[in-house]
Amino acid sequence: MTWNGWLQIAVFVAIVLVLVKPVGLYMTKVFNGERTWLSPVLRPVERLFYAASGVRENEDQHWLAYAFGMLLFNTAGFFLLYAILRLQAWLPWNPQGLGNLAPDLAFNTAISFTSNTNWQNYAGETTMSYFSQMAGLTVHNFVSAATGIVLAVALIRGFSRKSAQGIGNFWVDLTRCCLYVLLPISIVLALLLVWQGMPQSFDPYVTATTLDGAQQTIAQGPVASQVAIKMLGTNGGGFFNANAAHPYENPTALSNFVQMVAIFAIGAALTNVFGRMIGDQRQGWALLAAMGVMFAIGVSVAYWAEAQGNPAFASLGVDQGVSALQSGGNMEGKEVRFGIANSALFATVTTDASCGAVNAMHDSFTPLGGAVPLVNILLGEVIVGGVGAGLYGMLLFAIMAVFIAGLMVGRTPEYVGKKIEAREMKMTMLAVLILPLSILGFSALSVVWPDALKSVLNPGPHGFSELLYLFTSSTGNNGSAFGGFTGNTLFYNTTGAIAMFIGRFLMIVPMVAIAGSLAAKRSAPANAGTFPTHGPLFVGLLVGVVLIVGGLTYLPALALGPIVEHLAMLSGSLF
């Protein structure tokens, strides 16, 4: 570890914190229907969309109508993307003449991008045409991210409204999110990335002659436009197979830094939206503080573990040419232009934020370094989390925290003026328990299914970590891969797609039901017996609930993977 590495991490945190209030204020105005500085240009376009689609802008939807609209929209999007991938060979903008995707791979990919997971069982530059990348994947990067954001806003309205029947209008929220938030920022970000050297063209791939006379095909295409929303919307789907480790997808240290800031910007700012819309910004800062504590723990462990390197290699001796490498830390699977600090930070940020982008191979991390991305996802990706998904996931844990506090003092729990009763707790536990059911269930099935085990590259606990990571990333709608794993099989394309569907939509429906239940409640004024939820005590309780729930649920599985692998590494055994 170096002071320079810690300084870069500190600068990243500082910039994210600076962006929280202005971005939060802007998004609050957007979702409240207030005038913004973009309204003179975008308001006529917004009205045109409503007129063309028959949406009544001022109509407030019951939570059932809101949830139905969300499910209908995403179902239509899934079928449209599946059709694009299956008909790719006959669609335009395919200069390489790439063929149609196999049915199981198209099924997995369509659910992946519809659910904001962006798990990729394919190599983008050899599988996807420009049309599929733009009209299929990039469009879903926008609308799946917008879906997560507007659902978080719907839950916020549940807390902020009093005796209300509605939680907003899904179609209006979705339009405003894409038009006022995601699209303008993505345009600016894409231009910045082009300036840094990222391609944005429709030209065919370039064929170059190497120094020894061999022919090499250099893939390119409309990269910057996809990468911008890939990061801003915490999607993670790469244009290239190497994702953010590819020099065309992440050319410089500055592009790497900007992409990390983009990943956290909206998710962190949504905590401020929460505080503003309920009329107490301290509540939003408390949620962000809890996220910050867990982020600090994760990035510190990952950076420390990778900077220490592998003691087994260091013990081989200088004469074998390995000691010098490990004395500088574990650089295996990392880009030299990013180094250990930015690789550890990137891995932590992307798995905190439900973004599948990677600039280093998690499979090559040390056992503890690789455990950090895995644990981040297992905790529900509530440490900033995916855009929208992180906030509503953390709010579910906040409901659990105040319920536990209420049990301790023997009174009905309240959170930001709303009493938490049996209905809310039942829906909260249903949403929280869905994730481990999918992760542990599919992982258990895979370790006893002979054909499934053929996809695991490494033996022992490391191979188990690869398998566990697949279903953790799929169910957690993250999309990053541990590596060293063959996912493009009928078994994993099918089970992975089901896991992605469960992790996204079976968690969302109970959450929207909670929003409707809370919106219908009256607001209870604070009194001497009200547990304060904006101070250090609540932050500590919230962090404890997240860690304890995750620890009790997943510790046995972690013990079979990274924990035992770390102990084996210390004793000189490698996998």
Image (spheres, grey):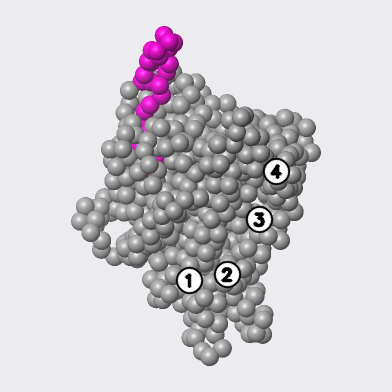
Which one is in front, 554 or 53? 554
- Which quadrant of the figure has residue 208? top left
Q: CA distance from mark 3 to mark 1?
A: 26 Å
Q: Is residue 280 above or below residue 568?
A: below
Q: Which mark is residue 286?
A: 1
SS category of the residue bearing label 1: helix
**Identity of the residue drawn at 77% across and 36% down:** 449
**Identity of the residue drawn at 38% across and 56% down:** 11
Q: How many marks?
A: 4
In reply to whether residue 208 is colored magenta, the answer given is yes
Residue occupied by mark 3: 434
Are there few (<14), some (14-19), or many (20+) residues within 10 Å of tag 3? some
Residue occupied by mark 2: 542
Residue occupied by mark 4: 569
Regarding residue 79, the answer to whether it shows in the image is no
Which amino acid, by three-letter code, is at mark 3?
A: Ile
Regarding residue 288, the answer to whether it shows in the image is yes
